[in-house]
Image: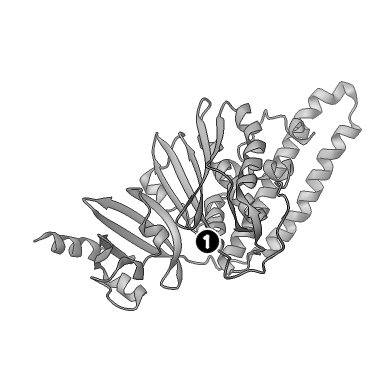
Amino acid sequence: MDAAGCLSAALGLVSEPAAAVKNGKIEYMNSAASALAGGDLTGAPADRLLPPQILYTQAESFVTGGVICGRSCVVRAASVDGLRVYVIEPDRDSGRDHGMLLSAMRSNLGNIKLAADRIALLCEDSQREKLAAYEAALYRSYYRLKRLVVNVSAADGIFRGTLPFSPAVLDLSRLCQDIASDVRTFAAGSGVELIFETSGGCVCYGDGELLELMLLNLLSNSLLHTPPGGRIRLSLSESMGFAVITVADNGEGITPEILGTVFSRFASDIPLSDAGGGAGLGLTIARGAAEKHGGALILESRPGEGTIVRATVSKGCPPSGKLRAAEAEYSSGGMDEVLTQLSTWLSDTTDINKYLD
């Protein structure tokens, strides 16, 4: 059997849509890929099937998401001898309505926050040391629950197409610098170095709140999986009409079997205790934020070596979303938002009060 026959036989066994690309052309696609594309595109330019931000990614293997043939999909890619194989998995909506759950959680969040605030006012000095631990536990639970509410709400909006998107002319370099400055305080406390690099100012059309949520989720993941003495590098560059935000760490990395599922975990039954009290939604939200901005989220990782996540943001005027007036200056949502998204990283001994002052 020749190479083409081997390729056909191998991809024919894959139930998901799969295609092989070489030198910018589709060498082979299985029947599932042909069904997704509405016909066999073998021999056609690869950009008839896949968007350029996926085709031109230089990593040898990665996972990303994007709109393929009109459908939101997760894409896994691997390269060998100049041939790149793409396995495409259409997103599946969980079909769940979390509205009532979120409403109940928001109500209880208010009670937890009120209790934590009152402890400091009601306790006597002789009881202060003992009650301080209870106060810290309440604040930690408050911020973890708040993060869960925020992220489940955002993920619901992504899957249902109702996520608010209000772009304006935005100084993306200032946004990244502000967030890096806030998060650096937490990173230093755990012995992790956070570096921000940029080649210069970068202005784009963007939703500042949504991009802040994306960045904080990515940095939270890196903090959670980078040991003391490690390094996280946040960088901003430009390429082919896109701003490229990169979060790279030298932490524990992600195993290949987990890497292929990082964007589809929302559709499964995940214990709420997973990932330090989160629900595994951070990368799903980051991907949705990048796609709202006309870009993509590209993730590559190797166990024991670390993880690199690249989020592309189109610099062109967005086709959807009502354009707001330009903001003279962007500042992040404050330490409260940072505490919320970094709450899975907070330990039992973290003194939250020092960040609230």
Q: Position of residue 193 (x, y in %)?
A: 55, 29
Mark 1 Cα-neighbour bin, 10 Å: few <14, some 14–19, many ≥20: many
Residue 159, quarter of the rendered image: bottom right
Q: Position of residue 19 (x, y in %)?
A: 29, 64
Nearest the camera: 236 or 295? 236
Residue at x-position 45% and y-position 56%: 240
Q: Quadrant of the C terminus?
A: top right
Instruction: Give the residue at mark 1.
Output: 291
Residue 143, quarter of the rendered image: top right
Q: Position of residue 103 (x, y in %)?
A: 74, 60
Q: Position of residue 79 (x, y in %)?
A: 28, 51
Residue 24, quarter of the rendered image: bottom left
Against 288, residue 342 (above or below) is: above
Helix, strand, or loop for circle 1? Answer: helix
Residue 101 visible in this rendered orientation of the protein:
yes
Amino acid on which the number 1 mark rests in the picture: Glu
The residue lying furthest to the top in this view is: 126
The residue lying furthest to the bottom in this view is: 38
Q: Quadrant of the N terminus?
A: bottom left
